[in-house]
Amino acid sequence: MQRTLVVKTTAGADDPERCAQAFTVAATAVASGVPVSLWLTGEASWLAVPGRAEAFELAGSAPLDTLLAGILAGGQVTVCTQCAARRGISQEQLLPGLRIAGAATFVAEITAEAAQAIVY
């Protein structure tokens, strides 16, 4: 059984380098055939809304919307329930293929026997 890589980022446009690192690692893992679950929390939650990833810029980084599309092609992207609620983001406002889920789902993913987690 192949391990799932669970990546969590709390950073969005407020800390673009840390945010891009999380997306790059997740997209690279998917491209390598590794199952991936990317969690968007804190300010990263905004990147689940149409237009936000396209507007993200960081010199020397692949475009975030391209990385996100790659992650969605072979992985799961989740927005934290509380983070979405604090920002007034609903499931209907998310990009297609993304979901909102809470801490219990995150804990279940990172404690699964075939999981490895990293946090940015």
Image (cartoon, rainbow, N blue to C red):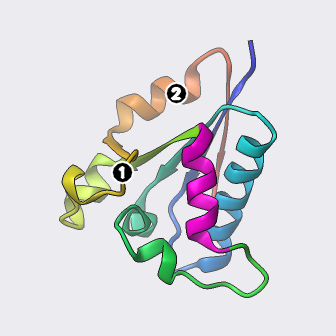
Tell me which residue sits at (42%, 70%) in the image.
43
**The residue stretch that appears in magenta:** 63-74
Tell me which residue sits at (65%, 14%) in the image.
113
Residue 83, image x, y percentages = 31, 57
- In the drawing, what numbered circle is on residue 109? 2
Residue 12, image x, y percentages = 50, 72
Contact, CB < 8 Å: mark 2 with mark 1? no
Is 70 left, or right, of 86 in this rendering? Answer: right
Whether residue 102 appears in this view of the structure is yes
In the image, what residue type sits under mark 2? Glu
Instruction: Inspect the magenta stretch and tell me whether residue 39 lies in it.
Output: no
Which callout, 2 or 1, points to the residue nearer the camera? 1
- In the drawing, what numbered circle is on residue 96? 1
Tell me which residue sits at (75%, 19%) in the image.
2
In the image, what residue type sits under mark 1? Pro
Tell me which residue sits at (68%, 18%) in the image.
114
Q: Report the front residue among 10 and 71.
A: 71
Q: Earlier in the sequence, mark 2 or mark 1?
A: 1
55 in relation to 102, above or below: below
User: Mainly helix, strand or loop, the magenta region?
Assistant: helix
Element at label 2: helix
Instruction: Inspect the magenta stretch and tell me whether residue 72 lies in it.
Output: yes
108 in relation to 102, above or below: above
- Quarter of the N terminus within the rendering: top right
Is 6 left, or right, of 89 in this rendering? Answer: right
Element at label 1: loop
